[in-house]
Image (cartoon, rainbow, N blue to C red):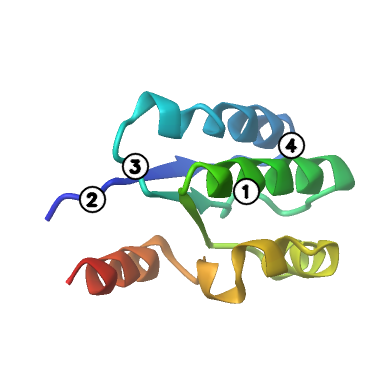
Amino acid sequence: MSYAATLALLVGGVHLVLGVGRLDALPAEHAGVHTVVLDAAGVNHLDATGDHMLRDVANRLQQRGVRLLMVNVHEEVREVLDASGFTELVGAAAFFPTDADAVAHLDDAAG
């Protein structure tokens, strides 16, 4: 089965900022992408700048009709995302414990 989804791996610190900055271009570069899956397993801490950038990317993706899913989000990072309003922005159903769970969700949605 083929998917119109993109998986991006975030690797903490500066890489988080750079990775999120590039995500904004993904939907324009890949016609037909309807979902971006962010694997945040490498992000152990999220500061205000990283949170702001994630919310900005989520807003831009939503404006283009692209759904954002989050996988492997550590509890501390999830607490920041909940408190900042990011979870409300993307929806609590956009979070999955593993990438396999997100793929299963995409399978169910496509099925």
Number of other residues with Cα within 10 Å of mark 2, as a class: few under 14, some 14 to 19, many 20 or more:
few
Write down the residue under mark 2: 3
Instruction: First in sequence, mark 1 or 4: give its number.
Output: 4
- Residue closest to the eye, 96 or 3: 3
Number of other residues with Cα within 10 Å of mark 4, as a class: few under 14, some 14 to 19, many 20 or more:
some
**What residue is shown at x 34% (from left), y 42% (from top)?**
33
Q: Taking 33 as reference, is 62 left or right?
A: right
Amino acid type of the residue that numbered disc 2 sits on in the rendered structure: Tyr
| Labels 1 & 3 near each other (Cβ < 8 A) | no
Instruction: First in sequence, mark 2 or 3: give its number.
Output: 2
Instruction: First in sequence, mark 2 or 1: give its number.
Output: 2
- Residue closest to the eye, 111 or 39: 111
Write down the residue under mark 4: 13
Number of other residues with Cα within 10 Å of mark 3, as a class: few under 14, some 14 to 19, many 20 or more:
some
Amino acid type of the residue that numbered disc 4 sits on in the rendered structure: Gly
The image quarter containing residue 106 is bottom left
Cα–Cα gap, marks 2 and 3? 8 Å
Callout 2 secondary element: loop
Cα–Cα gap, marks 3 and 4? 27 Å
